[in-house]
Image (spheres, rainbow, N blue to C red):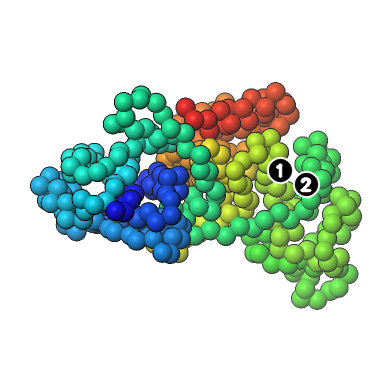
Amino acid sequence: MSRVIVSLVSEQTIPNYLFIKEIITSGDELMFISSKKMENKIDWILNELRYVDCIVDKCVFDDEDDEERWNKMIEKIKKSLNKQNKYIVNLTGGTKYMSLAVQEVFENFDSEFFYIPFPKNYLLNPMSQFDRSIPIKYRINVQEYMHVYGLKIKQKGITQSKEYTHYFFSLFTQNKFSNAEYETIDCLRDYREKNIEIKIIEEKEDEEKKRQIKGLSAFLETISFPQKDKEKLSKKETQYITGGWFEEYVYHLIKEKIDPQSIAIGVEIQHTKTTNMNDLDVVFTLGNKLFVIECKTGVGRVLLFNQIVYKASALKETLLGLPSNSYIFSLSPEDDTLAQTAKNMGTNYCDISYFNDKKKMDSLISEIIKSSYNK
């Protein structure tokens, strides 16, 4: 007799992955029930599970309308089953009609049923005489979350020490830069987009002058910038000075205040079906939920802010799944209109007041932690 874990596949793949990771034991087999449209998601789950020696069976409704034809579904599912097996069935995914058919068939076999009220973090056993929930102990990390949604990822990592980043943060937020120094930073932003190194020696009158910035050397000395090469700024160093420092500040803040299951910074994501890349500033998982923070030192014009909000909302809906939580952290002044615009698009906007008021930031951190509880 084999023990078979059964998963119904739909848009949300995390409940399938969590259920398997939570209950699988050595020797268990896997069975996936899916429409043809969702079949590729099975591979996303299996690729991240990496159970090389595990026996896997797929019951896929090949015709587009099969999942709406009761008798056809019943017949196809029955063909895949064996009276000698013990089935552990996760009813969370699939369509409602499909889950009804699955329950209809498996009730005639040795089966136990479970359901995850996702994104809540526990299992329900509808056939048990005890009306209680079973906590999910497994905790998913950022890489797993992305991969199970069919996303490839690259991570940038930290550029400078936590201590220096806090120092740079204080310079910026306390307006310690002169107008000339702000102009130097603005000039660096042009080079950030070009993604090239910048020479610091300013005396030479040659073609390399195009990649030099007036006053840069003095500016770097004023801020005690820890360069790896005194004659040039690397691409990563330029990115840091022109805003990357804020991403790193938020990264350290989240890591210290929340202590998430996993956290990543400067994440590039690409869907397996496309070549389009999307950048995420700070990403972390807590209580099997995904949190994404877009970090902007300023949002400037309303149009720019709307673009930022739209990006966060689109990523949440099309790539990362509706249960993800998105935030925009900014050092711009308070603006109720901007906050409401973000809220209307399902995004949380946190302006400079959160960084100036410890109680306000602590309250936000408490809300994030509370949202990850098993409730």
The reply to whether dot 2 and dot 1 touch (C-beta < 8 Å) is: yes
**Does residue 17 appear left or right of residue 362 in this picture?**
left
Seen in the picture, residue 46 relative to 362 is either above or below; the reply is below
Which residue lies most toward the bottom here?
Answer: 206
Real-space Cα distance between discs 2 and 1?
7 Å
The image's mark for residue 162 is 2
**Does residue 218 appear left or right of residue 273 in this picture?**
right
Given residues 93 and 20, the one toward you in this image is 20
Callout 1: 10 Å neighbours few (<14), some, many (20+)? many
Residue placed at 52% from the left, 30% from the top? Answer: 373
Helix, strand or loop at label 2? It is: helix
Seen in the picture, residue 229 relative to 87 is either above or below; the reply is below
| Residue that mark 1 sits on | 252
Q: Position of residue 179 (x, y in %)?
A: 81, 45
Label whose residue precedes the other's in the sequence (2 or 1): 2
Residue placed at 55% from the left, 43% from the top? Answer: 285
Residue placed at 61% from the left, 32% from the top? Answer: 350
Q: Position of residue 299 (x, y in %)?
A: 61, 40
